[in-house]
Image: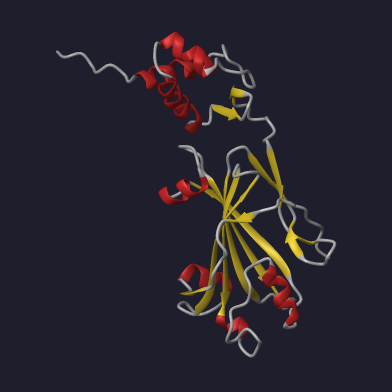
Amino acid sequence: MESGRRKARYQEIADHLRDRIMDGTFPAGQPLPSEEQLAREFGVSRPTVRQGISELRAAGLVEVLMGRGMFVRSPHARPNTTRPRGVRRDRDGRYVEADAIRWTTREEPVATRTDAPLVLADMLRVAPGEPMFTYDELQTAEHGRLRQAHRTYVPFSVLENTPYADAAPPPAPQLYAALERIGHELHWTENVRSRMPLPDEATALHLADGVPLFQVLRLTLNRHQRPLALEEFKISSDDLEMSYGFGIPT
């Protein structure tokens, strides 16, 4: 009877560390041996060690903190980044994101015409297939450490009999002021869910293996609860929490 195949070295490293984490040798919050130490111990290269660590990151057992090393993930640990969600006005009266992060768009967004798919049409309360202006942006901050994909949808029907009937409005957040100028009083709602990224999303957002993303859908509504625009944000969920304020309905 043939013996089973020997495990790959990176799997041996992952199994060794997983066992030590589960039996309490490495408790939550404790640093793990460095890549260099593990490479010496197992007689492998550092890329092999990183491959083993990526297995543990995908399982949610380990987190890597920039400049500090590898740590056993604690269910009670605070993330490195907290992002307040919402919209506010700056000192000049312009609409800006509540997180106060200075985002840079890699390329100036250009309006394209798309047709509303069924799910988005339902959220925007328009007929499936209605034409919409769509903007796509890949935004970065903190020298590329933070990345998000941002898409804005504006149905044509919202812009009928306005100065934007024949010319595209600006993307959000400049869109908000444009909607106010044509007579709308605005408020917003957001829906958030977590999901695994598609391959192109993982590449664009620089997501490590096994890291899900947050998908945030923000509706801009007028005072009659009519949806005016929809935004989609895709954000890495690694080491991030999002903060929302709310009040008691009156």
Q: What residue do we see at 68% from left, 66% from top?
A: 173
- Residue 83 versus residue 35 in the image, above or below: below
Instruction: Give how far across and how far down residue 89 sits, in percent.
Output: 80, 63
Q: Looking at the picture, how far across and down is residue 51, in whole percent?
A: 42, 26
Q: Residue at x 77, y 53 (%)?
A: 245
Q: Is residue 189 left or right of residue 235?
A: right
Q: Where does the image place residue 29, in percent across and percent down from the top left?
A: 64, 22
- Give the camera-side residue of 36 and 246: 36
Q: Residue furthest bottom?
A: 161
What number of labels is visible? 0
Q: Is residue 79 above or below residue 9?
A: below
> In which quarter of the view is residue 77 placed?
top right
Query: Which residue does the image show at 47% across and 25% down from the upper left?
Result: 53
Instruction: Please say which color scheme the image uses.
Output: secondary structure
Q: Nearer the viewer, residue 23 or 213?
A: 213
Identify whether 110 is placed above or below 20. below
Q: Name, please, the residue furthest toward the left.
A: 1
x, y percent for residue 140 = 60, 50
Q: Quadrant of the C terminus?
A: bottom right
In the image, farthest residue toward the top: 41
Point 62% across, 37% down: residue:
239
Q: Is residue 64 left or right of residue 19?
A: right
Quadrant into which the N terminus falls: top left
